[in-house]
Image: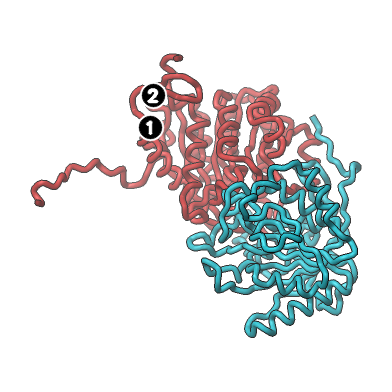
Chain colours: A cyan, B red
């Protein structure tokens, strides 16, 4: 007798970020994390495919949807030997779906309106790009906001840059991180909204490969994770993921870019939700 | 001019590649002490990204090509500082087990029958996956064979992997799939969980499974442990733990413990930070271990158009099988 029947597709069913609840904007509450997809194609990009990023990020995030799967016990981060608290996550993480594509002006207006509304409610928008062309739209919906940028092209010196792609792009990766965290604390004005742009190019190219802006001397996963954990302790109005092209020529089957981004984004989500590291949750090694 | 064209070409190695370009023969003809290769071209027990059914053929091709680039006469091994000669007749390829795609039980018994016969005869089964579930039938056959060859022997178990694979069941895929192979192995009669060791585990794991392993005396070394303690020290401790009261080691090599930035052609990628060099250092740490059987799994050529994954995996075999494939000549 066969031990089991044929396999079922893992990605079946409604695809939401980390298997979170689908909600309407009117149901969003203060403190929620609100996922929105931005499936836009940047026609200036060297390769087509950025519009597939939001779907790719959602697909990869399903692996971390443990909070919605009663089959599993709570997860442990085996590298840190720390219990991961997932209670309450399902109530506070939700997915609004994608901004509709078509008319550019309408799309930008809608993105601006939704981001402003989420900020007004006191929630945090998690915007799944794609193209970084929409980041100005997001920032313009958050008046007088400060911007933290991980990776990407350096455009405004008033922003706080983490491993930007410029002549000094190695600087922050190689400096003492605690010193950099202090610099960040001093730069941050908590009276202003905070916008975070998280570009895949923050990572070393040998790890990310699916980025249209390849680089040497980028960060490793651990460094980015630590940064996003620190940033997540701030009252962030919006974080926008950019730079992922899951369909770079010949590499549509390779999933490393989205996995890197989602894995490190988890640190932001947990930090933002206030799931602080608790010594009581440390898992002791049994020798 | 056509008349000047050189038509003397080296003969092709077709049909089909054999691992390390060594000889092909039936499992019943493998001699004691030889490595006997069993292909397990099945990915029906993977829950998401398929393609590992092409793994055995890719490993055969990659090891053959890499073998052809290595000197056949005496060569200098910069890692050991020894001059070595290639061994003769150290490995035979027994072909693939029969895979019945919609019947896991039949596939399990087919693979197990081959590795059992090899083990009973004193050979060392080397099983080529396939998804990681196939490690269970390979080890099942080894376990059965060991209980016939040495009835009172127990074996130690080391799994290099990004994941524990210790679930009792996985949703719709039930009890026999790529997330349960280590659990099923732990239920075999001649292995104790206290002799089971995992190395390279990273990211999120199920707390219940971790507690079950460590509560029974098993050990888990994370990727972070490899970074902090060093590959050599981790493998020294892993081997010591696995071999307590045991005579032989069964080694399961899941290639996905390597960081996906280097090795993307596998079903369940992780970002462990483990580089190829670090992975090979781990295998070097086991190259003198008393191997009774081993497998290498999760090579999925369709998921890596660059083909580097199968070559990285082939090098893993070169490393772990060093003492079998070379004769040490002189130290320099």
Note whether A78 is above or below B193 in the view shown: below
Residue B288 location (% of width, % of height)? 55, 23
Disc 1 is placed on an element classified as: loop
Pick the residue in front: A25 or A120.
A120
Pick the residue in front: B48 or A200.
A200
- On the rendered structure, is A126 left or right of A217? right
Pick the residue in front: B215 or B64.
B64
Residue at x-position 58% and y-position 28%: B286
Residue at x-position 72% and y-position 51%: A224
Q: Which residue is mark 1?
A: B70
Distance of label 1 from label 2 (alpha carbons):
8 Å
Task: Determine contact: label 1, label 2, CB under 8 Å.
Answer: yes
Disc 2 is placed on an element classified as: strand
Residue A260 location (% of width, % of height)? 66, 54
Residue B19 location (% of width, % of height)? 42, 39
In this rendering, does residue B165 appear at all? Answer: no
In this rendering, does residue B112 appear at all? Answer: yes
Note whether A211 is above or below B109 in the view shown: below
Pick the residue in front: A106 or B158.
A106
Mark positioned earlier in the residue sequence (1 or 2): 1
Note whether B34 is above or below B132 in the view shown: above
Residue at x-position 84% and y-position 40%: A283
Note whether A264 is above or below B246 in the view shown: below
Residue B6 is drawn in which quadrant?
top left
Residue B173 location (% of width, % of height)? 66, 57
Q: Which residue is mark 2?
A: B75
Rendered-image quadrant of the C terminus of chain B: top left
Q: Residues within 10 Å of mark 1 (few under 14, many from 20)?
A: few
């Amino acid at each position: 007798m066969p031990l089991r029947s044929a396999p079922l597709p893992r990605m079946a069913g409604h695809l939401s970020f980390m298997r979170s609840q689908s909600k309407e904007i009117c149901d969003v509450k203060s403190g929620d994390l609100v996922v929105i997809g931005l499936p836009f194609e940047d026609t200036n990009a060297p390769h087509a495919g950025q519009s597939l990023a939001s779907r790719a990020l959602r697909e990869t995030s399903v692996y971390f949807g443990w909070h919605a799967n009663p089959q599993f016990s709570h997860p442990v981060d085996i590298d840190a030997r720390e219990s991961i608290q997932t209670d309450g996550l399902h109530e506070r993480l939700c997915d609004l779906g994608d901004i509709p594509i078509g008319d550019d002006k309408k799309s930008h207006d809608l993105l601006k309106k939704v981001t402003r509304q989420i900020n007004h409610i006191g929630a945090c928008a998690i915007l799944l790009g794609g193209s970084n062309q929409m980041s100005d739209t997001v920032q313009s919906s958050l008046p007088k906001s400060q911007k933290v940028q991980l990776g990407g092209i350096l455009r405004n010196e008033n922003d706080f840059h983490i491993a930007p792609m410029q002549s000094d792009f190695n600087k922050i990766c190689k400096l003492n991180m605690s010193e950099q965290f202090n610099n960040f604390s001093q730069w941050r004005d908590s009276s202003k909204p905070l916008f975070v742009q998280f570009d895949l190019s923050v990572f070393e190219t040998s790890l990310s490969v699916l980025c249209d802006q390849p680089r040497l001397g980028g960060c490793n996963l651990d460094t980015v994770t630590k940064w996003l954990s620190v940033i997540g302790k701030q009252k962030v109005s919006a974080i926008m993921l950019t730079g992922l092209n899951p369909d770079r020529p010949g590499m549509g089957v390779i999933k490393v870019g989205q996995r890197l981004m989602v894995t490190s984004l988890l640190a932001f989500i947990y930090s933002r939700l206030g799931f602080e590291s608790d010594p009581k949750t440390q898992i002791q090694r049994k020798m | 001019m056509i008349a000047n064209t050189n038509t003397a070409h080296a003969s092709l190695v077709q049909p089909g590649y054999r691992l390390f370009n060594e000889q092909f023969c039936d499992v019943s003809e493998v001699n004691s002490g030889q490595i006997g290769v069993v292909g397990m071209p099945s990915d029906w027990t993977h829950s998401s990204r398929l393609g590992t059914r092409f793994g055995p053929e890719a490993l055969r091709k990659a090891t053959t090509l890499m073998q052809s680039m290595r000197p056949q006469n005496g060569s200098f091994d910069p890692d050991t500082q020894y001059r070595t000669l290639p061994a003769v007749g150290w490995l035979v390829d027994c072909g693939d087990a029969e895979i019945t795609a919609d019947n896991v039980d039949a596939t399990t018994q087919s693979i197990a029958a081959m590795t059992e016969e090899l083990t009973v005869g004193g050979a060392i089964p080397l099983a080529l996956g396939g998804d990681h579930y196939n490690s269970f039938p390979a080890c099942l056959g080894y376990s059965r064979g060991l209980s016939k060859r040495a009835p009172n022997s127990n074996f130690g178990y080391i799994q290099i992997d990004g994941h524990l694979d210790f679930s009792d069941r996985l949703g719709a895929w039930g009890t026999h799939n790529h997330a349960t192979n280590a659990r099923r192995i732990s239920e075999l009669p001649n292995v104790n969980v206290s002799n089971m060791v995992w190395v390279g585990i990273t990211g999120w794991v199920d707390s219940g499974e971790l507690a079950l392993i460590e509560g029974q005396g098993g050990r888990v070394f994370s990727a972070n442990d490899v970074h902090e303690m060093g590959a050599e020290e981790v493998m020294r401790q892993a081997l010591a733990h696995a071999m307590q009261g045991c005579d032989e080691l069964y080694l399961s090599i899941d290639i996905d413990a390597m960081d996906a930035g280097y090795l993307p052609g596998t079903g369940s990628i992780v970002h462990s930070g483990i580089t190829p060099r670090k992975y090979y250092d781990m295998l070097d740490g086991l190259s003198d271990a008393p191997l009774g059987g081993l497998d290498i799994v999760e090579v999925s050529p369709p998921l890596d158009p660059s083909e580097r994954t199968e070559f990285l995996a082939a090098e893993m075999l070169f490393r772990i099988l060093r003492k079998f494939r070379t004769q040490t000549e002189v130290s320099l």
